[in-house]
Image: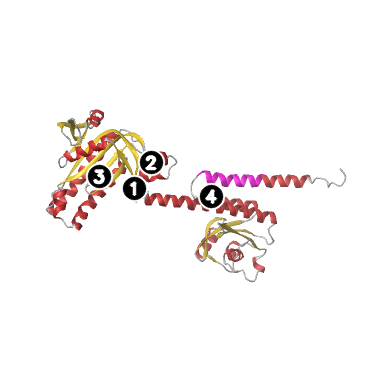
């Protein structure tokens, strides 16, 4: 064993302790990420770990906003210092460690701020720190922020400590990138929800969305509604008058659809088609459709009273039936709809056309399910266009109490 230096047991113990602390700190950051509570808890965990491992008295994270860097996270017992930093964002200059780090694009140390002629950030008078370390945060080669660690005694940070802060700066960059990605997805989903049914917007960004969009068989309840008297009204009304009628009508029905778990297929003039139990399962979907229809008739009557005062007579007819349909994406590249196809949709549409103003007609399958819970009156066998045999229909009057 000649020529080998003796092992320094104390040094090995110290190194193992450092590794253990690093592992714990990284574990805390990963747990913050796993909790999915948003970006702020992750950033706070990163800054806390960087401060502890570098034996700092405080640490902050600043993110770039235009030409300045604003504080977004801090580990410090002086709230006055945080307030001061909020009111005085850092610029790319030599008056602060954040500004110098931004100018240099690499780690910067100020061993003693009181001995540095260029340093002038006023928070020092509040917190009383002496030594500072700044480490840049890069995302795709873009400087997006700076991690700052400070101590109350002067002196440089060790190389090992600088490397640790760099590691946590990289963790901050990853967390910010993930948060931005999630924010983009959520923003896109929100925008999609303005043009699509919320369930369909969520489906597009879900793991199983492609399978469902490709087409599948589902048992659904389909609801059609359209306006009695609208054709005659449209023949004489100005375009502006048509929109004055359609807009509140669409808003009224549109507000009720998500409340009752429905999926909007389309608005087409005065016609609206909604189906239930796909892509999200709905318990008692036949009853949910009827509840939506009753609520729609109640709200529509308020609109109709206002229109009657202007000489416009309009009523709402609704048809509902349940059955199997093929559900999925239809259309062409650049313009797709999530639609249901099958005889059940045709039957609901025909029932809607046959319904009088203020009437809700349901087909035999819906009636068989809701007979004990819904007040109905039989209207007999209807000869509906496109159906070879008469269809038994029922007029919905309400939901039984108790």
Q: Do callouts 1 and 3 mark residues in contact (Cβ within 8 Å)?
A: no
Extreme-bottom residue of the structure = 117
Extreme-left residue of the structure = 311
Tell me how far mark 4 sits from mark 3, CA to CA. Answer: 45 Å
Q: Secondary structure at mark 2?
A: helix
Give the quarter of the image for residue 338. top left
Q: How many marks?
A: 4
Left or right of residue 354: residue 86 = right
Q: Which mark is residue 213?
A: 2
Which mark lies nearer to you, 4 or 2?
A: 2
Tell me how far mark 1 sits from mark 3, CA to CA. Answer: 14 Å
* Magenta residues, dominant SS class: helix
Which mark lies nearer to you, 1 or 4?
A: 1
Q: Which residue is mark 3?
A: 272
Position of residue 396 relative to residue 75, above or below, is above
Position of residue 12 relative to residue 381, above or below, is below
Extreme-right residue of the structure = 2
In primary-sequence order, the first of circles 4 and 3 is 4
In primary-sequence order, the first of circles 1 and 3 is 1
Mark 2: few/some/many CA within 10 Å (<14, 14-19, 20+): some
Q: Which mark is residue 42?
A: 4
Q: Which mark is residue 196?
A: 1
The figure's colour scheme reads: secondary structure
Q: Tell me which segment is drawn in magenta.
A: 20-35
Q: Secondary structure at mark 4?
A: helix
In primary-sequence order, the first of circles 4 and 2 is 4
Q: Secondary structure at mark 1?
A: loop
């Amino acid at each position: 064993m000649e020529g080998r230096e003796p092992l320094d047991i104390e040094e090995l113990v110290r190194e193992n302790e450092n590794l253990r602390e690093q592992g714990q700190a990284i574990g805390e950051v990963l747990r913050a990420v796993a909790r999915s509570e948003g970006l702020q808890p992750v950033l706070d965990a990163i800054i806390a770990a960087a401060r502890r491992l570098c034996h700092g008295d405080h640490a902050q994270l600043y993110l770039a906003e235009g030409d300045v860097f604003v504080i977004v996270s801090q580990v410090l017992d002086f709230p006055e210092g945080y307030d001061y930093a909020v009111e005085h964002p850092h610029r790319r200059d030599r008056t602060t460690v954040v500004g110098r780090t931004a100018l240099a694009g690499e780690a910067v140390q100020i061993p003693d701020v009181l001995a540095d002629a260029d340093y002038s950030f006023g928070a020092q008078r509040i917190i009383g720190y002496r030594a500072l370390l700044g480490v840049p945060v890069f995302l795709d080669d873009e400087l997006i922020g700076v991690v700052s660690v400070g101590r109350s005694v002067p002196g440089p940070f060790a190389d090992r400590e600088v490397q640790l802060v760099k590691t946590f700066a990289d963790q901050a960059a990853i967390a910010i990138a993930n948060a931005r990605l999630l924010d983009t997805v959520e923003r896109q989903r929100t925008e999609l929800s303005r043009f699509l049914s919320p369930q369909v917007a969520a489906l597009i960004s879900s793991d199983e969305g492609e399978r469902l969009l490709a087409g599948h068989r589902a048992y659904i309840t389909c609801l059609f509604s359209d306006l009695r008297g609208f054709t005659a009204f449209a023949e004489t009304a100005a375009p502006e008058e048509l929109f004055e009628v359609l807009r509140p009508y669409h808003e009224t029905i549109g507000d009720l659809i998500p409340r009752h778990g429905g999926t909007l297929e389309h608005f087409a003039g005065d016609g609206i088609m909604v189906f239930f139990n796909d892509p999200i399962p709905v318990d008692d979907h036949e009853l949910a459709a009827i509840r939506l229809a009753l609520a729609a008739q109640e709200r529509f009557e308020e609109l109709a009273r206002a229109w009657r005062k202007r000489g416009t007579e309009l009523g709402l007819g609704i048809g509902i039936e349940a059955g199997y349909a093929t559900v999925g994406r239809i259309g062409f590249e650049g313009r797709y709809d999530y639609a249901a196809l099958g005889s059940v949709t045709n039957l609901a549409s025909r029932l809607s056309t046959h319904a009088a103003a203020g009437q809700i007609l349901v087909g035999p399958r819906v009636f068989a399910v809701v007979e004990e819970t819904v007040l109905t009156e039989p209207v007999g066998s209807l000869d509906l266009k496109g159906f070879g045999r008469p269809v038994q229909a029922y007029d919905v009057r309400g939901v039984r109490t108790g």
